[in-house]
Structures are given as structure tokens and as C-alpha cells.
Amino acid sequence: MNGNDTMIDVAGLDVRYGEFHAVQDVSFRVARGESFGLVGESGSGKSTVLRAIMGLAPCQAARLEIGGAAVGPVRDKAFCRRVQMVFQDPYGSIHPRHPVDRVLAEPLSIHKLPDAESRILQALKDVGLGPAFRFRFPHQLSGGQRQRVAIARALITEPEVLLLDEPTSALDVSVQSEILNLLDGLRKARGLSYVMVSHNLAVVAHMCSRLAVMNHGRIVEEMTREDLNDGKAAQPYTRELIAASKGYRPAGAAACATA
């Protein structure tokens, strides 16, 4: 991967909470249009990496670049337009008293983007929701519909990067594959770059061409999708993780086939 192909470049990322070293010397690169996975057990630091990139966790980094541009300690409007995050819980990430119209209009107002009416309608269409959903409130939506609204909100500023923090783990199994296939289709159609955090190896195998395995705040191994599917792990921890998730491939294939 040469410099011109790199969309996300993270080197020497550290996150501390007092004496607790949550993330230690994490480095990875993601190409333009690529989907890259971060996997590991709960508490491994994978979600903290995403929050650090977004400026939501106290961090230091030897290098943090988006599209070749250095990211400073304060995430400005230009960064927030280029990089958006979809959170795990669609119930907690949308204001419960705001209708969908306001949820989608707010980022347009912040970034002073024109044609709000057409952008909102197109954003709903892009995530498989019709105009009838525009003035509904979150309590009138299913979990999958709420996550579609969260994805629409993230995409409405036309970002280049999406950070996905377990985007389907809070959803019913019946709709998980629908959301994954929606995300995969949007990435391909728009040339987006993804960093996806998941503890589910089936999700990572379906969505990501490469992945990094995290343990105790560190990346212990990088693999390709083919390596994962073939069980070609170099590190004992990664082999244990795959063994603990034995049977993930058939389950993932079946889930994804239902969408």
C-alpha cells in the first residue's frame, strides 16, 4: 500500500486513563475503499481505538492522518465531515425526542450544506427507508430502522471514512445481515473506507478484507480474510480466539445469505 492509496494512517496510538494503559502503540493503515476489521475480546481496546481517532478518548499518536492530512489534537469541522462514526447502540445514539427529519437536518446545518430537503430524502432512500419515515420519532422505529437512520446521519455529510463500532451487535439476528449488506453496498457504491470493530468473526470475515487482532490494548497480529477463513494464525492468542469461535463461518454464511 503506497502513500497515495492510504486513507487512514495510524501509528503509535496510545490511550491512557490515569494509570490504566487502555491502548498501547497501535499502528495500522487502511486503503481507500477498503474495509478493515479490529477484533478481540471485550476489553481488548478495539472500541477505544475508534473513539481515539474521533477525538472522544484522550490519546497520543506518533502519526494520525486521514487522506494524507495530519489530524491535530482537536477534531475540527473539516475532519468531522470527512470521518463519521456509527455506534453500537441505535437506541442511545439518536435523540429520543427528535424526529428523523431533525436528526438528519442537524449535521447539514452544522456543516452549512445546501439543499437540505433533497439531501434528507436521498439519505433515507440510500438506507432503504422511504419518505414516510421522515417525521417519525425513534420510539416508532424498530432497532434495525434506528440503525439505518444512524447510518443515514453519518453519510449525509458525504464522508470518506466510516468508523463502525459493533454496528449490528445490538440488533436482532434477523436484521443483522440486512444492515451488514447495506453497509457493504454503500462502501462499494461510494468508495468509502471502513474501520469496523467486532467480536464476531463471521461479521469480520464477511465485511473486511484485512483485520487486526487486539489483546490487552495491543495489536498482536494482522491477517487477511483468506488467512482467517483458512485458520492461518501465527499467534497463539489468535488461534485461541478462532477456536473459541469455532463454527463462526457456517453461521456467518447462513446469516448473510438471508439478506
Image (cartoon, helix red, strand yellow):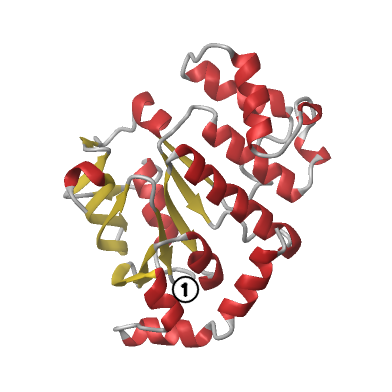
Name the element at disc 1.
loop
Relative image position of residue 196 (x, y in whole percent): 46, 56
Q: Which quadrant of the rendered structure holds the C terminus? A: bottom right
Q: Is residue 41 above or below residue 8?
A: below
Seen in the image, is 66 located left or right of residue 86? left
What's under tag 1, amino acid-wise? Glu
Relative image position of residue 254 (x, y in whole percent): 67, 72
How many marks the image carries: the answer is: 1
Residue at 31% across / 52% down in the picture?
30
Residue at 58% across / 22% down in the picture?
106
Relative image position of residue 194 (x, y in whole percent): 43, 49
Residue 209, quarter of picture: bottom left
> Considering depth in this image, is 168 or 129 the residue closer to the camera?
129
> Considering depth in this image, is 57 or 252 the residue closer to the camera?
252
Q: Which residue is mark 1?
A: 41
Relative image position of residue 152 (x, y in whole percent): 60, 35
> Considering depth in this image, is 218 or 128 the residue closer to the camera?
128
Q: Is residue 8 above or below residue 72?
A: below
Residue 4, quarter of picture: top left
Residue at 26% across / 37% down in the picture?
73
